């Protein structure tokens, strides 16, 4: 399933073969929370900006429009008109961060919907059933993401429960993939490593889930308040205990700098809302650092966001025009910034893969980081 093509230090270059096509790694997954990338970006647009994988949120789709409706509509691929890989998260993160008044028990979590307040129960089996109804390419195991400030005893108990939940996820997925009316009978399951910032808990958990032989391994509970150095340290100590012949996914991370550091530490998959969220606020990425297009200096700037960029925004429009659209609150302004940012991330991943193929990732990374720093100074 995962083909490791090359390694440079701990950095991995691979291909993940799925029923919805191959994923070239390292890859940045583009986040479409409710079945669409925020910023009026269509699935047709995604084909023009090098998107390989779309990520959708199980919790949001379960609450609205409902996973049974999506199943009746032929599954998420057909519903959103996207035939390439889709990864769905487990819903756990939103349940623990968004939903109101939750109660965690061995069987799962009771909480209230953030849309209409109705009481919902979600446990490992329910999360797998919802993701099976959505028929995503890759499903994520249902886990608890303890706060980075939680104490050691709490984190240890939580991680132990997450391991027991993983077994239940595996059993339930096996059952679902065998059912006659399951849309994607080849659905894959990724386990999630937790343990906050406790090295030994992280390592022990990595070893335990590695033995359980899932299709891929994610690191969860990072980029939730700890420093970048703490996050890099966790990757340094944990990733070596995850199977090198399976994809490694760093959830919810991050800036272009974070991604370069993650790749160096052996990460294959990334996802983050930064390029879309920043784009919607007129913050755009370039190889010389980030620009805020609302700034006065761009009022009559005829240059594209980035010279030489082949994205749909830069091929046609000036900074001055996009700035005007943003100020006038025209939807096109936001859309062009989101398209540019996703293209920037997806292109950087393509460059990273090229550098790994050539065996010069270290030099590429140093040069890229220097560019970001220099630009930030000017
Ligand atoms: Zn561009």
Image (cartoon, rainbow, N blue to C red):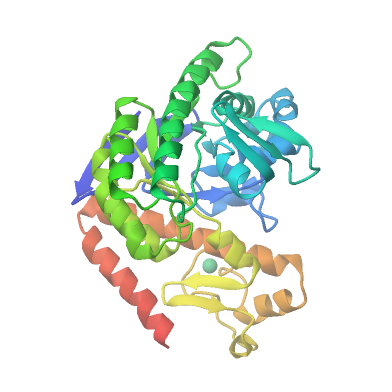
**Image quarter of the C terminus:** bottom left
**Image quarter of the N terminus:** top left
Residue 244 drawn at (x, y percent): 25, 38
Q: Is residue 229 left or right of residue 276?
A: left
Q: Residue at x 46, y 33 (%)?
A: 21
| Image height of 272 relative to 15, above or below | below
Residue 86 drawn at (x, y percent): 54, 37
Q: Is residue 355 left or right of residue 251?
A: left
Looking at the image, can residue 8 be seen?
Answer: yes
Task: Using the rendered view, name the quadrant where residue 128 is placed.
Answer: top right
Residue 168 drawn at (x, y percent): 48, 22
Counting the numbered discs, the total is 0
Residue 286 drawn at (x, y percent): 46, 72
* Residue at the right extreme, as displayed: 116
| Image height of 260 relative to 215, above or below | below
Q: Residue at x 75, y 35 (%)?
A: 119
């Amino acid at each position: 399933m995962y083909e490791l093509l090359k390694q440079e230090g701990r950095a991995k270059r691979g291909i993940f073969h799925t029923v919805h096509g191959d994923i070239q790694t390292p890859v940045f997954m583009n986040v479409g929370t409710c079945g669409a990338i925020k910023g009026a970006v269509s699935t047709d647009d995604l084909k023009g900006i090098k998107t390989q994988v779309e990520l959708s949120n199980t919790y949001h789709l379960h609450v609205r429009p409902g996973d049974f409706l999506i199943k009746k509509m032929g599954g998420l691929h057909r519903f959103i008109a996207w035939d390439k890989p889709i990864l769905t998260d487990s819903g756990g993160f939103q349940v623990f961060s968004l939903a109101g008044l939750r109660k965690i028990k061995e069987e799962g979590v009771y909480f209230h919907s953030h849309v209409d307040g109705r009481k919902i129960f979600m446990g490992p089996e329910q999360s797998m059933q919802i993701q099976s109804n959505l028929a995503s390419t890759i499903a994520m195991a249902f886990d608890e993401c303890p706060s980075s400030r939680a104490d050691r005893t709490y984190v240890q108990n939580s991680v132990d429960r997450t391991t027991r939940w993983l077994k239940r996820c595996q059993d339930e997925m096996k059952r679902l993939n065998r059912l006659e009316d399951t849309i994607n009978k080849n659905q894959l399951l990724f386990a999630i490593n937790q343990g906050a910032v406790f090295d030994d808990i992280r390592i022990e958990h990595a070893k335990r889930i590695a033995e359980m032989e899932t299709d891929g391994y994610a690191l969860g509970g990072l980029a939730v308040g700890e420093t970048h150095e703490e996050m890099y340290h966790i990757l340094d100590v944990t990733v070596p205990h995850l199977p090198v012949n399976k994809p490694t996914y760093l959830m919810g991370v991050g800036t272009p700098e974070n991604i370069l550091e993650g790749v160096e530490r052996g990460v294959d998959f990334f996802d983050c809302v930064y390029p879309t969220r920043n784009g919607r606020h007129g913050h755009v990425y370039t190889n010389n650092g980030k620009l805020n297009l609302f700034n006065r200096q761009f009022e009559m700037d005829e240059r594209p966001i980035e010279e030489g960029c082949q994205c749909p925004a830069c091929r046609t429009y000036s900074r001055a025009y996009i700035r005007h659209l943003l100020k006038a609150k025209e939807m096109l302004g936001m859309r062009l910034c989101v398209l540019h940012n996703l293209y920037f991330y997806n292109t950087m991943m393509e460059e990273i893969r090229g550098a790994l193929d050539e065996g010069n990732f270290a030099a590429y990374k140093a040069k890229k980081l220097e560019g970001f720093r220099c630009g930030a100074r000017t």
